[in-house]
Image (tube, helix red, strand yellow):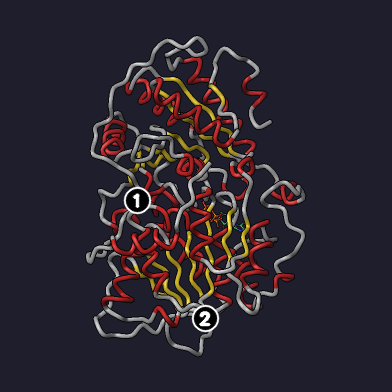
């Protein structure tokens, strides 16, 4: 099926394309287009209107979803098919006692499947390389953060562990998890290498761990030379698939990777790897242990997926305002494909008296972190955003994800990986979540169907005429 790729040539060509200007790029394929008005053709299955009956059905679904979000995690832990399943305790993973204290302090009672399977490899001696895949919200961050903290030699006052994240927000979140886990390991020091952080040229970093975005890390390592990539002995690539395959990150990550010592331990993590990206990962990581999901395991049972048919942009807007009215005690994230669409939607909702926050690459990093903090504290119940927040961001109370626009790649083709990451902002660690897709044209219907086929997972039509619908939810 696929044509053979010469990875060595591919890496060499990618490197040739590296520009001298090193800057941070967000994982968003935003364009500057205005939201378009589209008209849907008649469809025999589905009425065009987002009717009051549908609005009321939606409200019921959301309420039911919220009630079920109290699903017992312990039950899932005993189900071998669940990503939360584990047989071991954290004690059995041979963690340093102070790290173990940190883990329990965070309220973690037992490891998830990925933690239980990845940690023995990550902590093995001699060190083993790992390429790991596990569904969104199943505890990958804790797995690699525990490995990072375990590998630090505090007597050596220089950066030894490097973790790369695709966005500013994700780097900060990972640093916060690491700080929390290291609460009883006071000697471990960390530094963020992200936009807004500056270091004097010629100075030498003394922190043990660097967590950052690729552009800044490359700047600090190769331009300012404030730390030595050859002395890094643990390299973590979070969201590894976009980091090695998406334009903007790829050249920087590969350049960083090339400058590491051949003995540096590699830890690649993501919820998604398509086959080509996995082949490439296997090419750049020597003798890796691979933890891989089957396609049908990639999407989570605890996230119920729906679509709503809307005739045009105005009906999409009505659907969103209806959803706004039903969020209740949870929170919602609404994804738009472009910054402009996000700005348009948030302005319109604000004008109509709905309190919403908006986060996109249009804001400064200070504004971005401020918006996210307020959302985490529940000051706004609804956050409108772009793909910049599609990956990794962990806000426990998010019960609903809305795709105002379905995710497409630069060629307008369905972006199944982004879809999975977006809907994974809800349903964190076994909680229940609801994903609602707004479909306003035959093109968007085709995209939805293609996503459905890709994961072989039904996305249910929100049919107000079907009185059994609510009963089916969650089954
Ligand atoms: N063993 C555990 N017990 C209880 N909660 C946990 C455990 N491990 C992680 N969590 C919690 O689960 C949530 C999701 O974890 P995390 O953010 O690490 O997921 P992830 O797999 O990295 O997700 P994503 O693919 O979206 O990046 C977090 O709130 C985290 O605190």
In percent of width and height, residue 432 lies at 60, 40
The residue labelled by disc 2 is: 186
Image: 398 above or below 354: below
* Residue at 65% over, 69% down: 121
Tell whether 67 sits left or right of 174: right
* Residue at 39% over, 38% down: 335
The residue labelled by disc 1 is: 371
Which quarter of the figure has residue 38?
top left
Which quarter of the figure has residue 66?
top right
In percent of width and height, residue 410 lies at 33, 40
Q: Earlier in the sequence, mark 2 or mark 1?
A: 2
Tell whether 128 sits left or right of 195: right
Q: Secondary structure at mark 2?
A: loop
Tell whether 370 sits left or right of 273: left
Closer-to-camera residue (324/413): 413
Q: Which mark is residue 144?
A: none
Give the quadrant of the C terminus. top right
* Residue at 38% over, 24% down: 316
In percent of width and height, residue 196 lies at 27, 66
Which quarter of the figure has residue 373?
bottom left
Q: Secondary structure at mark 1?
A: helix
Image: 108 above or below 69: below
In percent of width and height, residue 184 lies at 57, 77
The crowding category of the residue bearing disc 1, from other C-alpha atoms within 10 Å (few below 14, some 14 to 19, many at least 20), is: some
Please identify the residue farthest to the bottom as the structure is shown: 155
């Amino acid at each position: 099926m696929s044509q053979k790729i010469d990875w060595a040539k591919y890496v060499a060509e990618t490197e040739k394309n590296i520009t001298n200007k090193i800057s941070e790029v967000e994982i968003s394929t935003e364009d500057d287009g205005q939201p378009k008005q589209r008209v849907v053709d008649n469809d025999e299955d589905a009425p065009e209107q987002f009717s009051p009956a549908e609005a009321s059905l939606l409200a019921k679904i959301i309420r039911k979803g919220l009630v079920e979000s109290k699903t017992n995690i312990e039950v899932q832990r005993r189900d071998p098919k669940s990503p939360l399943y584990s047989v071991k305790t954290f004690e059995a993973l041979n963690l340093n006692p102070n790290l173990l204290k940190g883990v329990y302090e965070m309220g973690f009672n037992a490891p998830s499947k990925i933690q239980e399977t990845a940690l023995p490899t990550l902590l093995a001696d001699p060190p083993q390389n790992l390429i790991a895949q596990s569904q969104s919200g199943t505890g990958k961050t804790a797995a690699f953060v525990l490995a990072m903290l375990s590998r630090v030699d505090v007597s050596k006052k220089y950066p030894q562990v490097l973790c790369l994240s695709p966005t500013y927000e994700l780097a900060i979140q990972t640093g916060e998890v690491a700080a929390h886990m290291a609460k009883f390991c006071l000697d471990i020091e960390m530094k963020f290498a992200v936009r807004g952080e500056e270091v004097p040229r010629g100075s030498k970093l003394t922190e043990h761990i660097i967590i950052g975005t690729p552009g800044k890390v490359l700047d600090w390592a190769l331009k300012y030379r404030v730390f030595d990539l050859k002395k890094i002995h643990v390299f973590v690539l979070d969201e590894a698939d976009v980091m090695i395959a998406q334009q903007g990150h790829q050249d920087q990550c590969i350049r960083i990777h090339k400058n590491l010592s051949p003995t540096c331990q590699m830890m690649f993590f993501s919820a998604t790897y398509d086959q080509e990206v996995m082949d490439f990962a296997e090419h750049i990581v020597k003798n890796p242990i691979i933890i891989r999901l089957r396609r049908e395991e990639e999407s989570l049972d605890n996230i119920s997926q729906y679509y709503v048919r809307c005739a045009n942009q105005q009906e999409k807007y009505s659907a969103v305002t209806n959803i706004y009215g039903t969020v209740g005690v949870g929170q919602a994230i609404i994804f738009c494909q472009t910054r402009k669409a996000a700005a348009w939607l948030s302005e319109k909702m604000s004008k109509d008296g709905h309190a919403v926050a908006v986060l996109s690459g249009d804001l400064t990093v200070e504004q971005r972190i401020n918006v996210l903090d307020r959302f985490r504290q529940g000051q706004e119940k609804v956050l409108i955003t772009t793909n910049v927040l599609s990956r990794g961001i962990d806000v426990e109370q998010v019960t609903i994800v809305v795709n105002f626009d379905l995710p497409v790649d630069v060629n307008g083709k369905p972006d199944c990986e982004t879809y999975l990451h977006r809907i994974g902002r809800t349903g964190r660690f076994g909680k229940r979540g609801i994903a609602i897709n707004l479909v306003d044209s035959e093109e968007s219907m085709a995209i939805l169907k293609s996503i459905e086929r890709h994961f072989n997972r039904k996305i249910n039509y929100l049919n107000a005429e079907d009185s059994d619908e609510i009963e089916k939810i969650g089954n």
